[in-house]
Amino acid sequence: MNGQKKHFYVFGPFRFDREERILLRDSKPVPLAPKVTETLLLLVQNAGHLVDKDDLMKGVWPDVLVEEGNLNKNIFVLRKVLGQWDGGLEYIETVPKRGYRFVAPIGVLAANPPESTGANEISLPLIPIDGSQRAPRRLSASMWLTFGLVTLTIGGALAVWSKPDNSLPKIVGSKQVTNDGLPKTSGPVSDGSRIYFSEFSSGRNILKEVGKAGGETEVIQTSVPDPIIEDFSPEDSQLLVQASKDQWNPEGSDFWLVPVPRGPTRRMEGIVGRAGGWVPALNGKFYFGKGKDLYVANHDGNNAYRIATAAGQVGAIRSSPDGSRLRFTVYDLGKYAYSLWEVRLDGSGLHPVLPGWNAPPRECCGTWTPDGRYYFFRGVQHDIGYIWMMQERTGPFHRAASPPLQLTAGPISYANLAFGKEPDQLFAAGEQRRAELVAYDKRSGNFASFLDGVSAGELDFSRDGQWVAYVTYPDGLLWRSKLDGSERLQLTFPPVHAALVHWSPDGRRITFSEIQPGRPWKISLASRDGGTSRQLTSDDLVEVDPNWSPDGNLLAYGVYPPGRPDQGSIRLLDLRTRRSSQLPGSEGICFPRWSPDGRYLVGVPFDATRLMVFDFKTSNWRELIKDVGTIGYFSWSRDSAYLYFDSSLTEDPAYLRVRISDSKLERIAGLKAIRRYISDFGVPWSGLGPGERPLFARDISTQEIYELDWQLP
């Protein structure tokens, strides 16, 4: 800070740097979204005094007209982050119908601390803001002298031992490279002059390339179905790809090599896994993951051997530029969490990169600058992916030179970071997600808007046709309203993320799947009239798609161990006794849907390539349909005679229906022309509205490749 004093607001275990807008807890940064940070600043600046809601909204969003719900969400996040003080009191007090007041004791710390805030800072006496606070005890002259000598000694030692490089990079602008708006499903990777990626178009994934300066994108031809990119080998000029349809397989799938600009695609023989890539050296080693294991092989994939086993599923693996280390993401699928880990190429030194930095952790998918000085990664907060950077370890004591620094602040959510050949070439996939509900008109063959102005999907309608429930995108909140949009009521709140919604037969309750940090997907129940929703079970299994029996006494739902959908089954929960039992013969089947007449229950195996139907009269399963592509959401006709569903990841995506009695298949609508929003479960949503009108969530997101302009120190 060029020798100028910094000023901190201090309360409980927290410091708030008002110049840098950084909240610290026990000297460690606490990640906060920019608007949440501004809300906190206004409250602590007026500590002890009521701040009206209007003043808060004008201060946080000075040039934007926003709803009060945005402010409520910020207050909710702050209360969750700050916790409680003095035996259970909230830091922020609500004054009904007026505003909020910061009520905890607060002081100001005026200091000239080291530029890299860390555990070696020494606090100065607090300057009380409120006269009701107890004044600090004055220090004697001898104590001040001792304090000064200790400070100089520690500061000098730190300067000699591990002087940090504080001229850190900053992102100062961005350039949009692509301009087609289509979902970017993998990549980018770059050879310095071209950028390669895959995108979802016409119901399947397609490989594409574009010059780094932008312009028209070009299709890269390959025989791999629905390809997604894992890495690029500069010395061989070839892309490493896998088939996206195999991503459900926990053990991984085949790796394929696609030469660029053109050439025959070939498979890497004898190797199956995921998240592969090469160490950046001449004929550098090939690495890949397989479940929880990390493997290293020769450049061509031969002679693979395991080097380490992680605590969860391994993904997003990258090598350091010097080839000495692998840094990767470990997915704790049972806790909706993922963290960065590191291991040396010889398998030694396995450890987390940022232990305790975020709880639960949600950082992933990082990469180094080509010179190895900095590491960039993605950190998720409030469903937005921010870019973070940290300086790599330097000095003889290998101390981290700085904590992670947040480089982006929204509203664009970034993912899949990649550098070109030069350190200043940083590429990323950026998006602002939004959906538009549309209904298909069978007579005209057109798609018309449905529930105008609502970015949502996963609709379900009450049996009397009066109510609709839906999930808003991308925030995953559950709402209900009348069909005309009136009497709209929000039923869930952050951090709950809802999906797969179903009305009870009497129209008074709604079941859904929910997920929140620290927990897997669970089945929950909400009242149509609002109030607190509640989870229905307490085990650690993943639970999805709770469906009502026609009498409203039972729920059918899918379960599987975290990360192993192939080991799933269907359970029946008796709401009267709270006892759950497995449906006979349902091993390997999930996502159940009960027919309106109660006779049938349909589900899909984990690979979503077949529909299976259970007949409660005969207690037998039979295959209803297969070989129609990847099966998405499905809906029963009111008379239980047909099952409607959509297919994707095929040359001819379509909305179809199959007759239960004889498996006769009928095409309802082609879906090549509609760009569809991808749900939390990796497939587009579809459903049936009143009069059995097919409904879809059209993707109107902004999803592009960006080159980020950042300044080197």
Image (cartoon, rainbow, N blue to C red):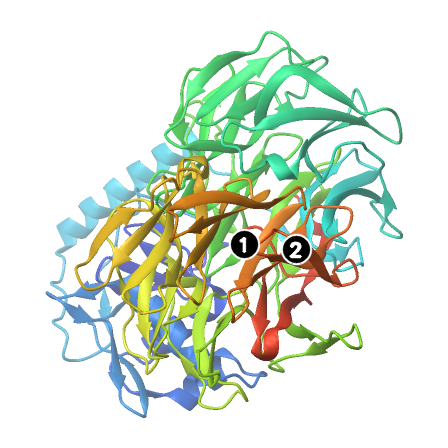
Q: Amino acid at mark 1?
A: Tyr
* Number of residue marks: 2
Q: Position of residue 11 (x, y in %)?
A: 24, 65
Q: Which residue is mark 2?
A: 430
Q: Label 1: state its secondary structure.
A: strand
Q: Position of residue 74 (x, y in %)?
A: 40, 72
Q: Is residue 342 above or below residue 673?
A: above
Q: Is residue 372 above or below residue 286?
A: below
Nearer mark to the viewer, of 2 and 1: 2
Identified at 48% across, 14% down, the residue is 306
Quick check: 637 left or right of 195?
A: left
CA gap, disc 2 and disc 1: 10 Å
Identified at 64% across, 9% down, the residue is 302
Q: Nearer the viewer, residue 298 or 155?
A: 298
Q: Position of residue 52 (x, y in %)?
A: 36, 89
Q: Amino acid at mark 2?
A: Gly
Q: Which residue is mark 1?
A: 386
Q: Is residue 310 above or below residue 438?
A: above
Identified at 41% across, 31% down, the residue is 399
Q: Nearer the viewer, residue 143 or 464?
A: 464
